[in-house]
Image (cartoon, rainbow, N blue to C red):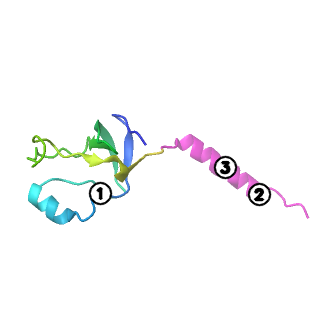
């Protein structure tokens, strides 16, 4: 799945390298992490090799100094998110009315 800037996404759970202790990582680097089930807007994207990396409008973290790369704001793996599927209220109401009308129709005996 490729995300684009401005797209709404839902956090389905943080994914990363096995063995990462997120609580320690969070307290040491003093960064904010997305919360599972919350909706966010993609602010930036980057190719991360095997996976796309994203940053979110709602979360702006401090610059972190990494051992193997220049200082930068942390990215999140895109596999921890899915696109938000928005349905208009009109469409939802039409579906509910159709279900209600079907339930009122007499059954053939």
Please tell me which residue lies in front, 95 or 54.
Answer: 54
Crowdedness of circle 1 by 10 Å Cα count: few (<14), some, many (20+)? few
Q: Position of residue 76 (x, y in %)?
A: 27, 48
Residue at mark 1 to residue at mark 2: CA–CA distance: 42 Å
Residue at mark 2 to residue at mark 3: CA–CA distance: 11 Å
User: Could you tell me which secondary element the residue under label 1 belongs to?
Assistant: loop
Q: Which residue is mark 1?
A: 35
Residue at mark 3 to residue at mark 1: CA–CA distance: 35 Å
Q: Which residue is mark 3?
A: 97
Residue numbers of the magenta segment: 86-109
Counting residues from the start of the chain, the first of labels 2 and 3 encountered is 3
| Residue that protrudes farthest toward the right in the picture | 109
Please tell me which residue lies in front, 3 or 60.
Answer: 3
Crowdedness of circle 3 by 10 Å Cα count: few (<14), some, many (20+)? few
Quarter in which the C terminus is drawn:
bottom right
From the viewer's perspective, is residue 86 above or below residue 35?
above
User: Could you tell me which secondary element the residue under label 3 belongs to?
Assistant: helix
From the viewer's perspective, is residue 72 above or below residue 11?
above
At a point 37% along the width and 50% down the height, the residue shown is: 79
- Dominant SS in magenta: helix
At a point 85% along the width and 61% down the height, the residue shown is: 107
Counting residues from the start of the chain, the first of labels 3 and 1 encountered is 1
Q: Position of residue 106 (x, y in %)?
A: 84, 59
Quarter in which the N terminus is drawn:
top left
Q: Position of residue 80 (x, y in %)?
A: 35, 53
Q: Which residue is mark 2?
A: 104
Counting residues from the start of the chain, the first of labels 1 and 2 encountered is 1
Relative placement, left or right, of 82 versus 49 is right
Q: Is residue 100 magenta?
A: yes
Relative placement, left or right, of 36 versus 65 is right
Crowdedness of circle 2 by 10 Å Cα count: few (<14), some, many (20+)? few
Please tell me which residue lies in front, 82 or 16.
Answer: 16
């Amino acid at each position: 799945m490729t995300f684009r800037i401005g797209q709404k996404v839902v956090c389905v759970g943080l994914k990363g390298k096995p063995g990462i202790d997120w609580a320690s990582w969070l307290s040491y680097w003093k960064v904010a992490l997305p919360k599972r089930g919350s909706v966010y807007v993609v602010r930036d994207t980057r190719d991360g090799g095997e996976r796309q990396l994203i940053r979110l409008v709602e979360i702006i973290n401090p610059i972190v100094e990494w051992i193997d790369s220049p200082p930068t704001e942390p990215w999140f793996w895109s596999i921890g998110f899915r696109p938000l599927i928005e349905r208009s209220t009109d469409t939802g109401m039409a579906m509910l009315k159709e279900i209600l009308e079907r339930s009122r129709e007499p059954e053939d005996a």
